[in-house]
Amino acid sequence: MSDPADPVSGLTWRQKEAVRESWGKMSCEWKTHGVEFFIRLVKTYPSILAYFKTFDGMDFDAIRSSPKLRAHMLNFKHGITSFVDNLDDVECLMVLIHKMTENHFRRQITINEFQDAFTLFSTFIQEVTQCDDLTVGAWTATLTVICTVIRDHMTLLQSRGEGV
């Protein structure tokens, strides 16, 4: 059976469905999973914590129980959900990624932080959902597309001198 790739994103229908299904499983308990993901993120990549001034001087237990972390992780969930919901509407997906990129670019967050977070996210979603290799590959492909759009948009923003 043929599973042609989307001409713009390069993602196949099966990849999109795998991402949708696994995110559906993960997102329903994201308030808990999101906190765990963030703690893993800053333990794995400690330099990322510097972008979160609200957590200055807090240990990991205090950060873990912070309502500000839960709120941030819910914002993250809504962002990922909007991306997943628009995998078939590439024009809308691009606008959503651009808006998120601009928001992070103003805070001097670079493509490297996104790549670190997305690398960890692929591993994290596999652990939490116990998904198969197709789904892991689908997430990797999807996050690669998102990362490419982020990188290209950051390059454009830099060339315009925005966020400096």
Image (tube, rainbow, N blue to C red):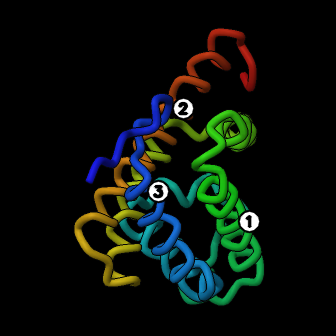
Secondary structure under badge 3? helix
Q: Quadrant of residue 73?
A: bottom right
The residue closer to the viewer here, 38 or 128, is: 128
Q: Which residue is at a point 65% across and 58% down the rendered structure image?
A: 85
- Determine the CA span between mark 1 and mark 3: 22 Å
Q: Earlier in the sequence, mark 2 or mark 3?
A: 3
Mark 1 or 3, closer to the camera: 3
Q: Which mark is residue 11?
A: none
The residue closer to the viewer here, 75 or 130, is: 130
How many numbered discs, if any?
Answer: 3
Give how far across and how far down residue 139 sits, in percent. 39, 58
Q: Quadrant of residue 154?
A: top right
Secondary structure under badge 1? helix
Task: Identify residue type, mark 1.
Answer: Asn
Name the image quarter holding the N terminus. bottom left
Q: To which residue does mark 3 refer?
A: 16
Q: Which residue is at a point 76% across and 83% down the rendered structure image?
A: 67
Give how far across and how far down residue 96 sits, in percent. 72, 43
Crowdedness of circle 3 by 10 Å Cα count: few (<14), some, many (20+)?
many
Task: Identify residue type, mark 3.
Answer: Lys
Secondary structure under badge 2? helix
Is residue 69 positioned above or below 42 on the image?
A: below
Q: To which residue does mark 1 refer?
A: 75
Give how far across and how far down residue 143 sits, in percent. 44, 49
Is residue 88 positioned above or below 65 on the image?
A: above
Q: Which residue is at a point 49% across and 73% down the rendered structure image?
A: 21
Relative horizontal placement of residue 148, taking residue 153 as reference (left or right): left
Q: To which residue does mark 2 refer?
A: 149
Task: Identify residue type, mark 2.
Answer: Val
Give how far across and how far down residue 140 sits, in percent. 35, 53
Q: Earlier in the sequence, mark 2 or mark 1?
A: 1
